[in-house]
Amino acid sequence: ALNNREAYFAPSFFQPGICDTHVTTGMNWDDAASTPIEDIRTGQTVVLGNTGFRPNTMVLGKGAWDLLVDHPDIVGRVNAGQTPGGPATVLRNTVAQLLELDQILVMEAVQNTAGKGLADSLGFIGTSLDALLCYSAPSPGLMVPAAGYTFSWTGFLGASQNGMRMKRFRMDHLESDRVEIDQAYDQKLVASELGYF
């Protein structure tokens, strides 16, 4: 069910042309001469200057996170916490604190794009080396700005707060249990100016 949400998000929101600001830095973060911290802070400053809201969330493809977490600029800032016998650990919350973000989300869901009966073709849904900075409302509300919202229909019979319900029942003729998940949600871009891709 969560893979379904990520598969919907990636092509609809995690690509150029969705946010008001889209930039190309000129070099990937796997280049030691690249400046990911400055790139991210520039994005935060641009959105803040245009809207009055500072991006508090960064969404990364798995590839971009792997490059960022190993970049010398990031490692150099967190290795001061290293202790004898204990290596410096670069965790998402550590990098988020360093970049003054509330959260870093990494697209790690995997999907099989092969047709039925064909050999598996597994891959990450968020494969790109891209990053999305956006303002995400800490407490969503009708008149509360955010780059986007996921709207969930909680009136869906038996649905939880996120618009999802699960059913599990026995299928004796198959000698197995069946689990079904129903979802009633929609992801909407609300303010493209609150995003920086």
Image (spheres, rainbow, N blue to C red):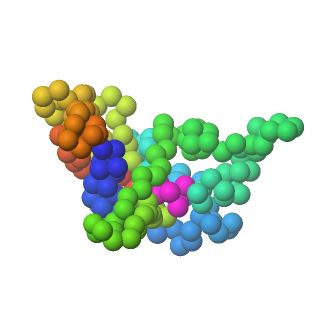
Q: Quadrant of the C terminus?
A: bottom left
At x 57%, y 71%, the residue is 27
Q: Tell me if residue 151 can be seen.
A: no
Q: Looking at the image, is 49 positioned above or below residue 94?
A: below
Q: Tell me if residue 195 can be seen.
A: yes
Q: Looking at the image, is 158 positioned above or below residue 195?
A: above
Q: Looking at the image, is 17 positioned above or below residue 66?
A: below
x, y (%) of residue 106? 47, 49
At x 49%, y 44%, the residue is 104
44 and 150: which is toward the camera? 150
Q: What secondary structure is the stretch in magenta mostly built from?
A: helix
Q: Quadrant of the N terminus?
A: top left
62 and 28: which is toward the camera? 62
The stretch in magenta equals 60-65
Count of labels shown? 0
Describe residue 175's horizontal placement relative to residue 155 as left or right: right
Q: Specify the quadrant of the image occupied by residue 160.
A: top left
Asked if the magenta segment contains residue 4, the reply would be no
At x 59%, y 64%, the residue is 29
x, y (%) of residue 44? 47, 49
179 and 34: which is toward the camera? 179
At x 27%, y 66%, the residue is 116
21 and 36: which is toward the camera? 36
x, y (%) of residue 76? 74, 50
Describe residue 88's horizontal placement relative to residue 30 as left or right: right
Q: Residue pushed farthest right?
A: 84
x, y (%) of residue 151? 21, 39
Describe residue 50's horizontal placement relative to residue 174 as left or right: right
